[in-house]
Image: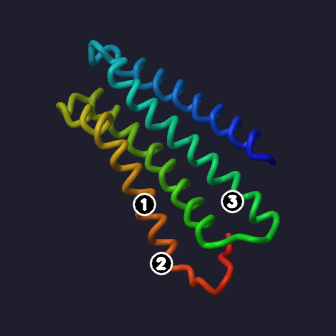
Amino acid sequence: MNTLSKTLVSLALGLLGFVLAGLAVTAVLDPHIWPSLFVGIPVGVTVGVTVALATVATLRYREHRHAGDLDTRLVAAYRAAVVAVATCVIVVPLGVAAVVFDVGEVGLAVLVFGLPAAVLVAAVVAYVTVRRTLPAGRPPTA
């Protein structure tokens, strides 16, 4: 897969993630928060960017794994992408549930501020952990 097609696939999936997450959060929070779009847009942006970057990392990882020339950086980036997506899948429903079940302002804080921070921290920790645990002399496994 060439660079242009990887970029287009990543942008398309990122845009799809933005639209789906933004619309879902906006629709679910509409009865609970008046300008629910102001919560849906930041969540959609965070999820869309995460999906786009995870797609890039996954496509690069699969291409190099197929060619047999994996290195530690690619494996670390791939695992960080998986952790970032998993963080989105966990944090968004928790934040929405906190708003829906009227836990207070905690749900809004989790969605608008906590989600980007959690995704960033989880991805960095996963990347650094893989880089430190895989020996430099040995090619990494999947």
Disc 2 element: helix
Neighbour tally class for label 2: few under 14, some 14-19, many 20 plus, Cα within 10 Å: few
Q: Is residue 3 left or right of residue 30?
A: right
Quadrant location of the C terminus in the rendered image:
bottom right
| Coordinates of residue 7 in the picture (x, y in percent) | 68, 40
Q: Is residue 29 left or right of residue 65?
A: left
Q: Is residue 9 left or right of residue 106?
A: right
The residue that disc 1 covers is 124
Is 119 rendered above or below residue 36? below
The residue that disc 3 covers is 61
Residue in front for this viewpoint, 104 or 80: 80
| Coordinates of residue 27 in the picture (x, y in percent) | 42, 18
Disc 3 element: helix
User: How much space separates mark 2 and mark 3, taking CA atoms?
Assistant: 18 Å
Residue 132: give its label: 2
Q: Mark 2 belongs to which amino acid? A: Arg
